[in-house]
Amino acid sequence: MKKVLVFILCDFFLLAALSACQKEYTGEYTEWGEKTNSNTTELLENHDIPYEIRNEIIYIPEDAFDAAIYCCS
């Protein structure tokens, strides 16, 4: 019984640590520079990077540029 309780507590702390590591992007939206006819929006969604589309141009938060470069290149 004690082992089960220790296992449950370890799982709880692991999940709490992983959820605290998720990045929240709060920067001002700037032009990403790609047209919306590519699969870029799908890649941004898959990597939880917020974006806006204005006049067929994709805009992302300034603090998400590095993550967007890694996921979309």
Image: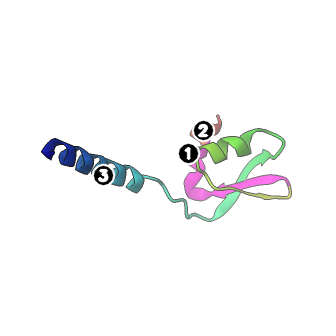
Quick one: quadrant of the C terminus? Answer: top right
Which residue is tagged 2? Answer: 71
Could you say whether the residue bearing mark 1 is in a helix, strand or loop?
A: helix
Which residue type carries mark 2? Cys
- Quarter of the N terminus within the rendering: top left
* Comes first in the chain, label 3 or label 1: 3
- Residue for badge 1: 67
Name the residue at 13% across, 46% down: 2
Q: Nearer the viewer, residue 32 or 4?
A: 4
Disc 1 packing (10 Å; few <14; some 14–19; many ≥20): few
Q: CA distance from mark 2 to mark 1?
A: 6 Å
Q: Amino acid at mark 1?
A: Ala
**For mark 3, what is the residue?**
12
Q: Nearer the viewer, residue 30 or 54?
A: 54
**Residue 20 forms part of the magenta stretch:** no
Q: Which residues are magenta?
A: 56-68
- Give, as a three-letter code, the residue at label 3: Phe
Labels 2 & 1 near each other (Cβ < 8 A) = yes
Q: Secondary structure at mark 2?
A: helix
Residue that appears at 60% across and 57% down: 62
